[in-house]
Every structure is written in structure tokens, then in C-alpha cells.
Image (tube, rainbow, N blue to C red):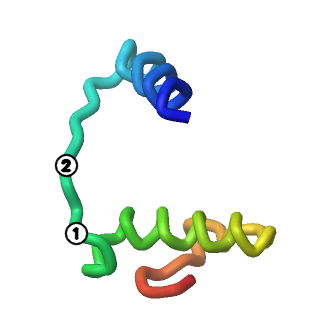
Amino acid sequence: MAAKVQYLWNEVEINQKLTWRHVRAHRGHRWNERADHLANRAVQKRTPEPLSFWKPGMR
């Protein structure tokens, strides 16, 4: 899995400079909360809410 992430990172970075930034979990950070939402929905085998309808804090 780590190799796949690295591959994707390298592919995207060809066109867009990427950087890592540590975000404390469950602190209301929009994209961290979105990632949590997507992960939970995947575990539940449910379709995630579209980003346009999703609000931080929702799962």
C-alpha cells in the first residue's frame, strides 16, 4: 500500500508541488474530517456524501 501511495504522490507531483503537513485528528480540520468520513463510509460499504453536501463533523 505504501508503494501505491508513493507512486500516486510522484504522479501528481509532476504537475503540482505537494507537501506534507501534520493535522491533529478530530480537531475540526475540514480535509481531515473528510478523510475520516470517506474511511468510515468505505468500512460500512456505503457511498460517501458528495463534498458539496458534506459538512465537517459529519460521518
Residue 17 place in picture, x, y as percent:
26, 25
- Left or right: 32 as drawn, with respect to 46: left
Residue at image mark 2: 21
Q: Amino acid at mark 2?
A: Arg
Q: Residue furthest top?
A: 14
Which residue is rendered at x = 75% and y = 74% of the image?
44
Which residue is rendered at x = 59% and y = 65% of the image?
38
Nearest the viewer among 48 and 23 is 23
Residue 59 place in picture, x, y as percent:
56, 83
Residue 49 place in picture, x, y as percent:
66, 73
Which residue is rendered at x = 44% and y = 25% of the image?
6
In the displayed structure, 1 sits above or below 53; it is above
Residue 31 place in picture, x, y as percent:
38, 63
Q: Residue furthest bottom?
A: 57
Q: Quadrant of residue 42?
A: bottom right
Q: Quadrant of residue 28?
A: bottom left
Nearest the viewer among 52 and 26 is 26
Mark 2 to mark 1: distance in Å? 10 Å
For label 2, the SS is: loop
* Label of residue 24 in the image: 1
- Left or right: 31 as drawn, with respect to 27: right
